[in-house]
Image (tube, coloured by chain):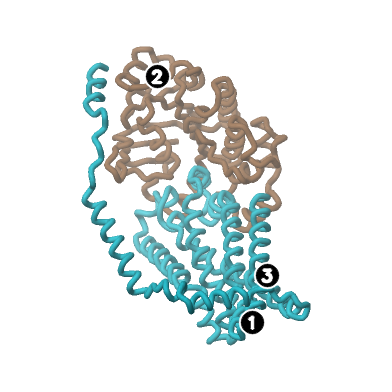
C-alpha cells in the first residue's frame, strides 16, 4: 500500500521533521505509530495523506509515485486516503449529515456539492455510515452541538463515506476521555477490519497500540526507532523510545 | 533550585526604568507635529469664542429651535427619508457584489499559501506567479476603492450619471465595496484551518473547499460585518445629498443655504432616529445569527 524510500521533510525554518524514513506498509495491515510528542508523527501522516510533499526521498502509494502527481490526479489519489484527526476537523457550523457527506466532495461536482448543502445528496450512504458509528439520531444536528466523542464518530463516518483504501488516524482518541477513547478505538479497528481497509494510527496511548495493532512503529526525532510486531515491544524497547524526553511515556491510557 | 533562587534575588527589586532616548525623541516629534498643525491648520479659538463667534453660535443655536414639525414640512421629508434608507440598502448590496469576489481574490489562503498549496505550489511556477499577481491586483483595487472617500466618489458619479440617488448608491457601493472586500479577506484568512485541511486531504477541489470549508465557518462574521457597514451606509447616505446624490442630505443642504435652521434641526433629528433604529435592528439580527 505504502512504500517510503529515505523520505525527508525539512521545513522552511530548518526543522527536520522527518529524517530518512524508509518503510513498507502492506494492504490490509494495521500499524500503530508511537513516540514522544514532537517526534514528527503528524508530519509523517501529512506526507502519507499527500498534503505535504517530501523534501527528498520517494513515496509510493499503491505503486504510484507521488512525485509524479499534481493537480487533478493528485486530488483523485487523495480520495483513496481517509484521515481521522485528533481535533475531528469537522465544520462546526454544518449539520452532521453535511459533514459526513463532505467525504464525498472528492467525487462530487461543485453543483452537486452545493445542492447537497440544501438537500443532502446520497443520503443513504451517509445514513449507513452514521449507523455504523452509532449516532444515526444526530443526522440533522448542528455539528458544534455534539460532544467530543460524538464528533469523532462523525469524523469516522466521514472517512467511511469517502470509501478510501487506507484510513490514517492521527491521534484519533487523544481528545476524549480514556474509556470513551477505547470504545472509539475498538470501533475504528472493527470498521477497518469489516471494510478491509488498511489502518495506520498515530497513538499517544501506548496501551492502545499494543492492544489493537499487530505492528508497532516507534518514531523518535523524525526517524524510525523500531518497527516490531507488538508482541516484541518490551519495556526496554519502550524505555529507549521515550528516553530523555521530559514527559514520561503514556503507558496507561489513564494518563 | 538554590541557584535559581539566588538569580532571582540578583534581579530583585527590578531596576528602575530610565528615560529611553528613543521614547523621548518620539515625544518631541509628536509635540512638534502638534505645534505645527496648530499653525498650519489655522486654529484660531478667538474666531469661535470671540464676540462675533459667540453671536454666530447664538444665532445658529436659537435658529435650530424649535424644530419645524409642521405637517407640510414633515410630508416633504417622507420621500427623502425613504430614499436615504434605499440608497443605504442598495449601496450596501452593491458593496457586497463588488467586495466579495475581490475578497476571494485577495485572500492569500485561497490563492497560494497554506496546506492547500503545499503540494501544488512549488510546482507550477507560472500559475503561481499569475495567482499572486491577481491577488496583488485585487488588493490594490480594494485599497483604491476605499482610500477615496465616499463623498468624492459621489461627486464623480454625479458628473457621470447626473443628480439623484443613483450616484449615491454607486458611491457607497464602490467605497464600501473596498472596505467590505478588505475585511472579508481578513475574515476568510482567519477561518480555522483544521476542517479545510481535512476536506483538502479527502480530495475536495478548491471551489468545494470554499463552499464547505471556508464560507460556512465565517458566514456569521461576513453577515455581521455587512450589517455593520449598512449602519454606516445610512449615515453616509444622509450626507451624500450635500453633493447632489439624493436623500436627506439634499434637504440639509437646502435648509442651510436658506438659513432655515429650524428645518435643519428636524432633519438632524430624523437622521438620529434613523441611525439609532438601524443600530438596534442590526444588533437584533446579529444576535439571532
- Residue annotated with mark 2: A249
**Callout 2–callout 1 Cβ contact below 8 Å:** no
The chain that appears cyan in the image is B
Q: Quadrant of residue B252?
A: bottom right
Q: Classify mark 1: helix, strand or loop.
A: loop
The residue tagged 1 is B260
**Figure check: A46 above or below B105:** above
Depth check: give the residue in front, A32 or B179: B179
Q: What label sits on residue A169 in the rendered view?
A: none
Closer to the observer: label 3 or label 1?
1
- Give the position of the N terminus of chain B as an image quadrant: top left
Quarter of the view holding residue A235:
top left
Q: Could one spot residue B165 in this view of the protein? A: no
- Residue B249 in the image, given as x and y percentages of width and height: 61, 77
- Between label 2 and label 1, give the one nearer the viewer: 1
The residue at the point 36 percent across, 63 percent down is: B129
Vertical placement of residue B104 versus B80, above or below: above
Where residue B38 sits: x, y (%)? 35, 70
Chain letter belonging to callout 2: A
- Residues at marks 3 and 1, CA–CA distance in whole angstroms: 16 Å
Q: Residue furthest top?
A: A235
Amino acid at each position: 500500500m505504502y512504500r517510503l524510500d529515505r523520505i525527508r521533510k525539512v521545513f522552511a525554518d530548518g526543522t527536520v521533521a522527518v529524517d530518512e524514513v524508509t518503510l513498507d506498509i502492506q494492504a490490509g495491515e494495521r500499524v500503530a505509530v508511537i513516540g514522544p510528542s514532537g517526534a514528527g508523527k503528524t508530519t509523517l501522516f501529512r506526507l502519507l495523506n499527500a498534503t505535504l510533499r517530501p523534501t527528498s526521498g520517494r513515496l509510493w502509494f499503491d505503486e504510484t509515485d507521488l512525485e509524479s502527481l499534481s493537480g487533478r490526479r493528485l486530488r483523485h489519489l487523495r480520495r483513496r486516503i481517509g484521515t481521522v484527526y485528533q481535533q475531528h476537523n469537522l465544520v462546526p457550523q454544518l449539520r452532521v449529515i453535511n459533514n459526513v457527506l463532505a467525504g464525498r466532495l472528492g467525487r462530487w461536482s461543485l453543483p452537486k456539492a452545493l445542492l447537497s448543502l440544501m438537500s443532502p445528496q446520497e443520503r443513504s450512504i451517509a445514513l449507513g455510515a452514521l449507523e455504523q458509528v452509532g449516532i444515526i439520531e444526530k443526522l440533522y444536528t448542528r455539528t458544534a452541538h455534539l460532544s467530543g466523542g460524538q464528533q469523532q464518530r462523525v469524523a469516522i463516518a466521514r472517512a467511511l463515506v469517502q470509501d478510501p483504501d487506507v484510513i490514517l488516524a492521527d491521534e484519533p482518541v487523544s481528545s476524549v476521555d480514556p474509556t470513551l477513547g477505547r470504545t472509539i478505538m475498538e470501533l475504528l479497528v472493527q470498521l477497518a477490519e469489516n471494510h478491509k481497509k488498511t489502518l495506520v494510527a498515530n497513538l499517544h496511548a501506548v496501551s492502545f497500540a499494543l492492544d489493537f495493532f499487530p505492528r508497532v512503529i516507534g518514531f523518535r526525532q523524525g526517524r524510525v526507532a523500531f518497527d516490531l510486531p507488538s508482541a516484541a515491544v518490551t519495556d526496554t524497547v519502550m524505555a529507549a523510545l521515550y528516553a530523555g524526553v521530559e514527559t514520561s511515556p503514556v503507558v496507561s491510557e489513564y494518563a | 533550585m538554590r541557584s535559581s533562587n539566588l538569580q532571582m534575588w540578583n534581579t530583585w527589586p527590578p531596576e528602575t526604568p530610565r528615560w529611553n532616548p528613543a521614547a523621548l525623541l518620539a515625544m518631541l516629534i509628536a509635540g512638534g507635529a502638534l505645534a505645527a498643525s496648530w499653525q498650519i491648520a489655522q486654529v484660531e479659538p478667538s474666531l469661535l469664542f470671540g464676540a462675533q463667534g459667540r453671536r454666530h453660535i447664538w444665532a445658529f443655536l436659537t435658529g435650530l429651535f424649535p424644530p419645524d414639525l409642521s405637517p407640510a414640512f414633515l410630508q416633504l421629508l417622507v420621500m427623502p427619508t425613504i430614499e436615504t434608507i434605499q440608497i443605504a440598502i442598495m449601496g450596501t448590496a452593491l458593496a457586497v457584489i463588488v467586495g466579495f469576489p475581490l475578497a476571494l481574490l485577495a485572500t492569500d489562503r485561497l490563492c497560494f499559501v497554506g496546506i492547500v498549496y503545499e503540494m501544488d505550489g512549488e510546482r507550477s511556477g507560472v500559475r503561481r506567479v499569475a495567482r499572486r499577481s491577481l491577488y496583488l491586483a485585487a488588493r490594490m483595487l480594494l485599497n483604491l476603492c476605499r482610500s477615496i472617500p465616499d463623498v468624492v466618489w459621489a461627486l464623480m458619479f454625479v458628473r457621470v450619471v447626473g443628480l439623484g440617488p443613483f450616484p449615491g448608491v454607486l458611491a457607497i457601493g464602490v467605497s464600501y465595496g473596498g472596505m467590505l472586500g478588505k475585511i472579508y479577506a481578513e475574515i476568510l484568512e482567519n477561518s480555522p484551518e483544521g476542517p479545510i485541511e481535512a476536506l483538502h486531504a479527502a480530495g475536495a477541489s478548491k471551489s468545494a473547499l470554499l463552499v464547505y470549508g471556508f464560507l460556512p465557518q465565517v458566514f456569521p462574521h461576513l453577515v455581521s460585518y455587512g450589517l455593520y457597514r449598512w449602519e454606516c451606509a445610512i449615515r453616509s447616505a444622509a450626507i451624500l445629498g450635500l453633493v447632489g446624490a439624493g436623500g436627506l442630505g439634499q434637504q440639509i443642504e437646502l435648509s442651510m443655504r436658506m438659513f432655515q435652521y429650524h428645518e435643519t434641526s428636524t432633519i438632524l433629528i430624523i437622521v438620529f432616529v434613523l441611525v439609532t433604529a438601524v443600530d438596534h435592528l442590526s444588533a437584533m439580527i446579529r444576535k439571532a445569527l
